[in-house]
Amino acid sequence: MVDVDDALIRALQQDGRRSYSGLARDLGLSRNQVSARVRAMVAQGRIRIVAAADPGLLGERVMAHVAVVGAGPSSAVVEALCARDDVPLVSAVTGGHDLIAEIRTSDLGSLQEALDWLRRFPEVAALDVALYVEVSSGVFITEHSAARGIDEVDVRLIEQLRHDGRASCRHLARTVMLSESAVRGRLERLTSSGVVRIGAVVAHDAESRRTKIGLGITLCGDGEPVVAALRQCPELEFAARTVGRFDLVATLNSAEAATLVSRIEELTALPQVARMETWHHLQTWKEDYALSLSRERALRG
């Protein structure tokens, strides 16, 4: 069932509310088979299907990839990073660094404050930072196609979907006291306009039996062919143009390690790639892009 689960995960990363019937047609399985596999993965904690609001709505206009070189046990640093709302990702990695974190802030000054805070830990020897210039691909990244105005009913819907991205329209309708058809209309507007994205977050720990590889790419020419090649990789979870340590940062995730080795070889062979550094995510301690929109709006007054 590994191949089936992998295909389901990729489909649900693209659209977490895709119907079981639609998934079944794509995979050539019965609806009951698909329903059973998705429910089992959720129940086992292998995936979470959640909604995340657009980073702009959350005030997250500056995003950075931060690699931490440790100077001792990292547990205190991990715990502190995981407790911050502006840190959606914390992962233990191999290679020249011990931890990878993503930091999202409202401006460069706030990013600098977060980095200064991190440097004050005695267990942190050094930081290497790459600032995102353009996010090319990501489960919870969208391109806006409409105005992003939302009301309090939208906020309540998003809050429900943060916890269960596949909550039924009947359940959502009872929660926000609207008709099911009105809820469907609002969901269509929120997702099609890029206000919210609903997708699967894949658990990554010793029990997940998946391989997650980070890529740091230095370019020697036009980066667009490399971005295009990354977007063609079914295993791609994230890709961004950056300034700083690398020109491109990406993440690949698969149940088959050999597949990722082949992908890396293909990317390294591109003439625009001058150098590539890779790291293996050993355990992802936090991956949560579903920041509370109602809390964020309250903090901003």
Image: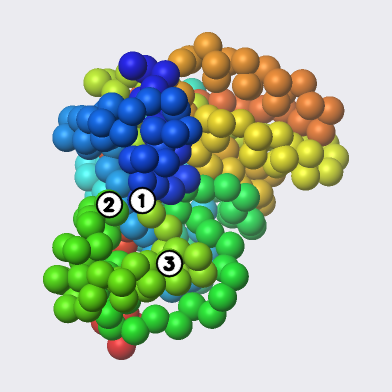
**Disc 2 marks which amino acid?**
Arg
**Residue 286 position (above or below residue 60):** above
The reply to whether discs 1 and 2 touch (Cβ–Cβ < 8 Å) is yes
Rendered image: mark on residue 17: 1
Question: Residue drawn at (51%, 69%), measured in percent from left and top?
Answer: 193
Taking the image as shown, residue 183 lies to the left or right of residue 189, namely: left
Which residue is at the far top? 258
Taking the image as shown, residue 122 lies to the left or right of residue 160, namely: right
Q: Nearer the viewer, residue 81 or 124?
A: 81
Number of residues whose C-alpha sits closer than 10 Å to that of mark 2, classed few (under 14), some (14–19) or many (20 or more): some
Number of residues whose C-alpha sits closer than 10 Å to that of mark 3, classed few (under 14), some (14–19) or many (20 or more): few
The kind of secondary structure element at disc 1 is: loop
Give whichever of discs 2 and 3 has the lower sequence position: 2
CA gap, disc 1 and disc 2 = 6 Å
- Residue 287, image x and y in percent? 33, 45
Q: Nearer the viewer, residue 34 or 124?
A: 34
- Residue 97, image x and y in percent? 46, 31
Q: Disc 2 marks which residue?
A: 166
CA gap, disc 2 and disc 3 = 14 Å
- Residue 76, image x and y in percent? 22, 42
**Residue 252 position (above or below residue 256):** below
Residue 293 visible in rendering: no
**Disc 1 marks which amino acid?**
Arg
The answer to which image quadrant residue 227 occupies is top right
Rendered image: mark on residue 188: 3
